[in-house]
């Protein structure tokens, strides 16, 4: 049987590897201080918490010391506050730290990660600013050119559809808007999203494993390249809803989908 500190360090080790991979300079997903990652820590008899990257650290080089473990509850309270100021946010961030002696501040996007990790089956979250994706999130046509699905593996990895968030100030406002858009998605599709595009900002991958977060991010990056090319070649040809539903329900595709979640 694995004891609690072992579970904690296993998750942290996986999160560091995921972060370093997403930060690889040759992947063009995030540079310098861009992006952040998180992981849920579910340990019985300890209130729910998660690891989040500390503010000002770099995905490419983060180590275990650059992640802060915070409790969900105070962070969720903050999201429900009308318009929290910087002072309130800092106070609650301090209150949320599992280790109160730990100095660094959690990322400004801690609230956004809390919303995503709170969804059933989401254990790891990767937020990046991929160059190819941001070509389209920063275009005047957002979100049109990212809507629908264009090839089978885009459906398998990113889900039948994605969540789209109009540009919102990062922090509490963005988290509140994300919560609202995810609720609309859940109502419409009856399942949680795997991929979120934020206007003039970037991408979020929601996975049950670190491998799934990487795969979703890589596939979104590739899909954005193809979509951009298709636009130049006369327009994006998206699948009909029937085809999207058919592919996502095929037993062989479901089998592949589960394999892709493994590390
Ligand atoms: Zn960002």
Image (cartoon, rainbow, N blue to C red):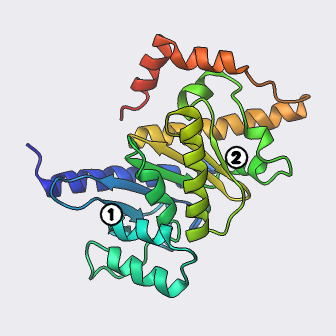
Task: Count residues near mark 1 (Cα–Cα under 10 Å), then give few for <14, some for 14-19, many for 20+.
Answer: some
Q: Which of marks 2 and 1 is in front?
A: 2
Q: Which image quarter is the N terminus in? A: top left
What SS does tag 2 mark?
A: helix
Give the mark, 2 or 1, whose residue is nearer the N terminus: 1
Query: What's the residue at 25%, 75% (across, down)?
Result: 99
Ligand 1, seen in the image, is in the quarter at: bottom right
Picture coordinates of residue 224 (x, y %)? 71, 39
Task: Tell me: is circle 1 under 8 Å from ligand 1.
Answer: no
Query: Which of the two residues, 35 or 73, is positioned nearer the viewer here?
Result: 73
Query: What's the residue at 53%, 84% (across, down)?
Result: 86
Query: What's the residue at 42%, 47% (across, down)?
Result: 119
Q: Tell me the residue that label 2 is attached to.
A: 133
Q: Looking at the picture, does residue 86 appear above or below residue 33?
A: below
Q: Tell me the residue that label 1 is attached to.
A: 64
Q: Which image quarter is the C terminus in? A: top left
Residue at the extreme left of the image, as rendered: 1
Residue 24 in view: no
Disc on res. 53: none
Picture coordinates of residue 9 (x, y %)? 23, 56
Task: Tell me: is circle 2 under 8 Å from ligand 1.
Answer: no
């Amino acid at each position: 049987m694995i004891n609690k500190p072992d579970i904690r360090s296993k998750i942290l080790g996986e999160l560091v590897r995921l972060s370093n991979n997403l930060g690889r300079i040759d992947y063009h997903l995030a540079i310098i201080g861009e992006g952040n990652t998180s992981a849920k820590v579910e340990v019985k008899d300890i209130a729910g918490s998660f690891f989040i990257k500390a503010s000002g650290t770099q995905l490419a080089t983060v180590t275990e010391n650059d992640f802060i473990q915070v409790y969900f509850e105070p962070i969720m309270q903050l999201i429900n506050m009308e318009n929290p100021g910087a002072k309130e946010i800092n106070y609650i961030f301090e209150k949320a730290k599992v280790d109160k002696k730990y100095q660094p501040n959690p990322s400004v996007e801690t609230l956004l990660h809390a919303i995503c990790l709170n969804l059933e089956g989401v254990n790891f979250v990767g937020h990046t600013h991929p160059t190819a994706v941001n070509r389209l999130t920063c275009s005047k046509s957002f979100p049109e050119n990212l809507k629908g699905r264009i090839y089978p593996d885009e459906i398998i990895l990113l889900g039948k559809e994605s969540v789209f968030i109009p540009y919102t100030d990062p922090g509490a406002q963005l988290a509140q808007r994300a919560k609202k858009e995810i609720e609309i998605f859940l109502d419409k599709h009856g399942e949680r999203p795997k991929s979120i595009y934020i206007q003039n900002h970037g991408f979020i991958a929601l996975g049950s494993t670190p491998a799934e977060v990487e795969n979703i991010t890589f596939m979104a990056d590739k899909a954005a390249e193809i979509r951009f090319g298709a636009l130049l070649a006369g327009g994006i040809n998206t699948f009909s809803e029937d085809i999207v539903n058919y592919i996502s329900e095929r037993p062989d595709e479901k089998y592949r989908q589960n394999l892709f979640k493994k590390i």
